[in-house]
Amino acid sequence: MTKRAVVLSVVCAVGLVGPPPVMGDYWDEFGDGEYAQDPNNPDIFDPNLWDIDNPHWTIRDLITSYEYYSASTGALWLFADTYIPAFAWLDAQADDGDHDPNTSTAYFDNSGSHYMVAYVMVDPDFPNTGRANLRMYNDAVAHWTAYACDYVPSYQGGNARTAISSYNGVDRTDGPNEYRTDIDPNGFWMALQYDTNASVDPNNHSVRAAAWNGDKYDWDGQWDLSASLTCWWPDDLWTEGAYSVAVYGDANDSGIVSYMAFDNIECRWGTFTNTHRRLLDVVLKDCCELNLEPNLCYAGEPRRYTHGTVVCLDAVVPCGDKSFKKWTIKGPNDALDPNYQVVNDTNEVLYLTMDADYHVKATCKCGGGGMTPLLTMTLGVLGLLSLIRRRA
């Protein structure tokens, strides 16, 4: 058995006792047109419910006299303005209702590297105003404690600007591409990465940021900005917090209105990579429903994931009286490749690490001990005919 087959078999075997997706990881592509559950509808609202690919987003109006937010267009649009020409702020934080960093699925701590990626769009009616903001370690109470990166369409009348900052009053912008002229405001990607290397230095923490056009995985792998937290903020090394997206503007911008959208948000442990997207194709044979988390669907193509994402598959609804039989995992290569493998797994719950492209089939079979109504009626008729023959 090849090394690939051994690794894949171990991954599949984990399905029986494996852990759920890592605490803190979540995604949202706003495909349902909503940013939160409806608290006025008790049938669909559960304040303790956390969906890893459709989380609650709590809108926080910190400093605005006018606000607007919507996901009806398939993206989270935030619109902040104030009638006082000084400052405007509106943000959205994925919130599971639990702000204890030891249990909350929305919180991260500084024990390992993690990142945030989002697709950003600027409203064409406000092309040179406001700022888009990605935030890490956003404290639930002290809202201004965070590491962040900004996109400013027109900074003090100049070029578009990206910056890393910590909300201690000092703006940090060290890096080769602080000012950008190539960013497409109609749609671009931003990434904010928190790195730690505790095995080398327990105080070795850094924050990096990048912005690029095109696809999520078109990034060239180069960070526009990089900051050492130990050197910059020795007294401000935040230990835990949530992530959020925000729009804001102040008197330094060419306008106070900020109207921007965020979509395809990904927040997870690990290091963001420009490795080609990993594709997952899932088919059902006699299984009528599949639970898959995270279920990242894109129109016209298989589900795609960042390299290393753990996917949980659960074929819990067979058709009719059938029961689950097995998973068949094919890949990552085609049948002519010497590393091509087909692995079967009979555990109903499957955890699969997306380190390559995979084709997965869920197969269900007739349930043990159960009979369809047609089969029951047929056996009854045969039994009756046999009895008639014996008495004839």
Image (cartoon, helix red, strand yellow):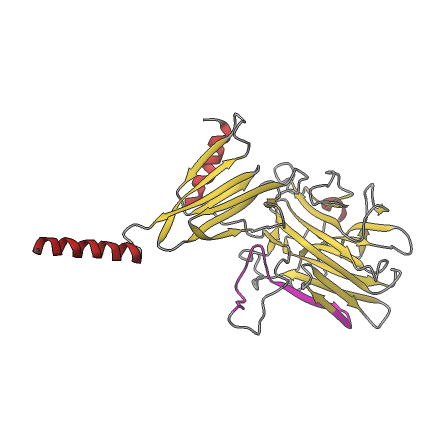
Q: Is residue 361 left or right of residue 150?
A: left
Q: Does the stretch in magenta take in 93? A: no
Question: Which residue is nearer to you in this view: 359 or 88?
Answer: 359
For the C terminus, give its image quadrant: bottom left
Magenta-highlighted residues:
44-67
Counting from the top left corner in percent of width and height, residue 285 is at: 44, 46
Query: So how many labels did they put on this image?
Result: 0
Question: Which residue is nearer to you in this view: 89 or 371?
Answer: 371
Counting from the top left corner in percent of width and height, residue 140 is at: 64, 62
Reply above or below: 325 against 129: above
Task: Residue 89: name its quadrant.
Answer: bottom right
Query: Which residue is depicted at the point 38% across and 55% down?
Result: 320
Q: Is residue 342 left or right of residue 299?
A: left
Counting from the top left corner in percent of width and height, residue 317 is at: 42, 54
Question: Which residue is nearer to you in this view: 309 or 235?
Answer: 309
Question: Which residue is nearer to you in this view: 331 or 194?
Answer: 331
Q: Is residue 168 visible?
A: no
Q: Residue furthest right?
A: 157
